[in-house]
Amino acid sequence: MRSGVVTNRRKNVHPGKMLATFAFGSRELYAFMDHNAGLEMHPVDVTDTAWLAGRNDTLRSINSSRAGRSRASCRP
């Protein structure tokens, strides 16, 4: 986003906007998100619908999660 490679300008729905459901990260991430007019936060039942995906000519999605093991699952 900072370098201008991703602009979201070609989106048919929410042009120029990033849509997200949640964020977990560093102070730098939260500073980027704070009062960012190019970011909209929505519930998952809005962001992950086939209707929304189908309204844009092309779709690029970044889904990531942090997965970890509990201590119980690490026991021999």
Image: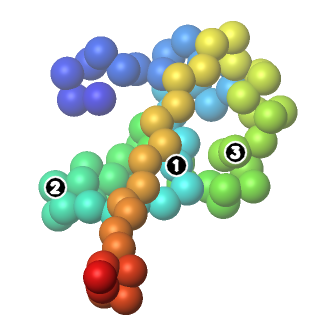
Q: Residue at x 35, y 74 (%)?
A: 69
Residue under pointer 3: 48
Residue 33 visible in this rendered orientation of the protein: yes
Left or right position of 15 against 16: right
Going by the numbered disc 2, the residue's amino acid type is Glu
Q: Earlier in the sequence, mark 3 or mark 2?
A: 2
Residue under pointer 2: 28
Question: Which x, y percent locates residue 16?
Answer: 50, 26
Left or right position of 52 against 18: right
Residue under pointer 1: 20
Question: Within the image, what quadrant is residue 74 found in?
Answer: bottom left
Label 3 neighbour load within 10 Å: few <14, some 14-19, many 20+: some
Taking depth in this image into account, of 2 and 23 the one nearest to the observer is: 23
Q: What is the quadrant of the C terminus in the image? A: bottom left
Q: Residue at x 50, y 16 (%)?
A: 9
Are the residues tagged 1 and 2 within 8 Å (C-beta)? no
Are the residues tagged 3 and 2 within 8 Å (C-beta)? no
